[in-house]
Every structure is written in C-alpha cells, then in structure tokens.
Image (cartoon, rainbow, N blue to C red):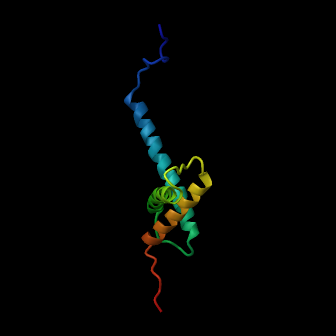
C-alpha cells in the first residue's frame, strides 16, 4: 500500500493548478518589467509610459529577441546555451518597442 501523499495516486486539487498559473503569470510580468526597464534605460530621455506598458514592451521585446536569435543564428538557437546573447537581444527588442510606443519621432529640419 502506498502511503498518503506519495506515489502516482496523489490527489491534486484545483488550488494547486491555480497557484501554479498565478505564479507563472507573475513571473512573466516581473521578467517583462525587468527587460522593459532595461530597454527604457537603453534609450536617452524620458519615456512617458507606465509599469504595465513597460512590462508589455519587455515581454514583446523578449519575443522579438527570440525570433531575431532564431533568424540570425539558425534554428538551433537555444536561449539556455546563450543566456547573455538572449538578454541582449531581448533588451534591444524591448528598446525598439519602447521607442515605437513612446511616440518618438525624429525632427525634420
């Protein structure tokens, strides 16, 4: 007989699944906020946007950085093997999105 809480017959509750999903969403938002903040720091001057927009730019920048890594380095691109390059590409993607979202326009002289 398998003791309670061990083995393949462990009961899972809906609370366990909900907690995992909430933790995953919070992790995505915090990482997006971190990458978005680095993207904002990469651009000179103030960018008029809030925390949520910064986090969304960070998440989008990470996605763009992953796509750029796959295109530049081939289909064998793996973020686990190149963590610094992944971070740089994610920040560059976030900086591009921050530049687009913040309404930066070049002055025409």
x and y, in percent, of residue 1 in the image? 47, 7
Q: In which quarter of the image is residue 53?
A: bottom left
Residue at point 50%, 47% (across, down): 27
Residue 42 versus residue 5 in the image, above or below: below
Q: Nearer the viewer, residue 52 or 58?
A: 58
Q: Which residue lies furthest to the bottom in this view?
A: 109
Q: Nearer the viewer, residue 65 or 1?
A: 65
Residue 76 versus residue 40 in the image, above or below: above
| Total tally of numbered discs in the picture | 0
Residue 48 versus residue 73 in the image, above or below: below
x and y, in percent, of residue 91 in the image? 55, 61
x and y, in percent, of residue 5 in the image? 48, 18
Residue at point 42%, 40% (across, down): 21
| Left or right: residue 59 compared with residue 85 | left
Residue at point 44%, 71% (across, down): 100
Residue at point 48%, 92% (across, down): 109
Q: Quadrant of residue 88?
A: bottom right
Q: Residue furthest left?
A: 14
Q: Residue furthest right?
A: 84
């Amino acid at each position: 007989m398998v003791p309670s809480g061990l083995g393949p017959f462990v009961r899972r509750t809906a609370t366990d699944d909900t907690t995992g999903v909430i933790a995953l969403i919070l992790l995505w938002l915090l990482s997006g906020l971190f990458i978005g903040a680095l993207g904002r720091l990469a651009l000179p001057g103030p960018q008029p946007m809030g925390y949520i927009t910064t986090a969304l730019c960070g998440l989008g920048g990470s996605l763009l950085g992953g796509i750029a890594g796959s295109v530049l380095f081939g289909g064998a691109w793996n973020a686990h093997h190149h963590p610094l390059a992944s971070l740089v590409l994610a920040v560059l993607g976030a900086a591009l999105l921050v530049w687009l979202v913040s309404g930066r326009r070049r002055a025409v002289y």
